Image (spheres, rainbow, N blue to C red):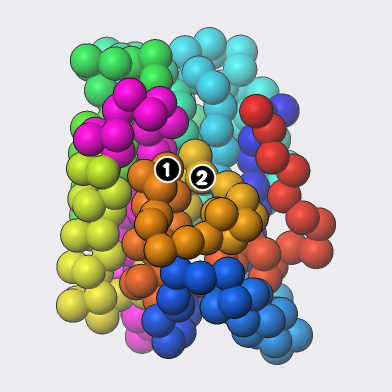
Amino acid sequence: MNNLNIINSTYSKNFKKQQKNTNNYKNQKKKDRKIKDNITFSEGFLKIATHNVRGFNNETKQNIFKTFYKEKKIDIIGITETKLNRNNGKICMNNIDSYKTWWETNEDNTMGSGVGIMVKSELAKHIHKVHKCKGRLIAVDMKFKEHSDVKIINIYVESNDAEKQQRTETIQTLVNWIQQGKRLNKKLIIMGDFNADSEQWAKEASGTIKNKYLILEKLCNENLIDLQKIANDVPLKHTG
């Protein structure tokens, strides 16, 4: 199985702005632990996962993962690094009854891009708009009766330092979507493959933010928190 992170969540919560240095990062972790003590999971929570599939052109692979998602009762899955082209994206998993799917591809670089979102069929009726950008970002706006609207964004950040400018543009689009969601009072969930290690970022924290950690800096500036750390007792295992 490739990298799969699962969280139970209603939505992200806002906090006071977090600064760039390590001390504030540690203070944020303490806040996260306090919140975790107060979270009670119930059937009313959405089960959300993000999965770097490292290519999704193989139908057998698609079926294996589809079965796994159903067995784990995952409601929404953000897929990254699909490597799908436009034609394959039109037909990828579009004949399954358990999930509805949306895909975004980059025809200029299919091998290092591609994102998608899979939503349980019974939840898909709540989606009223889908946003896409350059094979790196995809988002869904969801409306729930008598509840806050939700925007779920899935992102696959450029990993190659030769693509610093493209990475900066991708992250700026993400920030624009986040700020737009805030203006409309939407609850926000950001997931995907950031290609940035938050633990390493904390160790290297200084006055100058390296480009590869830019997304972490921006998310902190937008007062978002790491729900994965709150919702799971087992720490993430990073792969190369």
Residue 63 horizontal/vertical position (percent): 61, 22
- What element does badge 1 sit on? helix
Q: Nearer the viewer, residue 49 or 197?
A: 197
| Residue at which label 1 appears | 212
Residue 50 horizontal/vertical position (percent): 55, 45
Using residue 129 as the reference point, say whether residue 187 is left or right of it.
Answer: right
Residue 55 horizontal/vertical position (percent): 50, 18
Q: Is residue 163 magenta?
A: yes
Tell me, for residue 171, which label it has, or none: none
Residue beneath the point at 59% across and 60% down: 202
| Position of the C terminus by quadrant | top right
Q: In this view, does 175 lie above or below 223?
A: above
Tell me, for residue 196, which label it has, or none: 2
Using residue 45 as the reference point, say whether residue 129 is left or right of it.
Answer: left
Using residue 116 as the reference point, say whether residue 64 is left or right of it.
Answer: right
Residue beneath the point at 64% across and 75% down: 26
Residue beneath the point at 18% across and 68% down: 180
| Position of the N terminus by quadrant | top right
Label 2: few (<14), some or many (≥20) within 10 Å?
Answer: some
Residue bounds of the magenta highlight: 138-167
- What element does badge 2 sit on? loop
Contact (CB < 8 A) between labels 1 and 2?
yes
Label 1: few (<14), some or many (≥20) within 10 Å?
Answer: many
Amino acid type at mark 1: Lys
Q: In this view, does 113 lie above or below 146?
A: above
Q: Does the magenta stretch include residue 73?
A: no
Amino acid type at mark 2: Ala
Q: Does residue 97 appear in this view?
A: no
Q: Nearer the viewer, residue 12 or 205?
A: 205
Q: Which of 149 and 222 is in front in this view?
A: 222
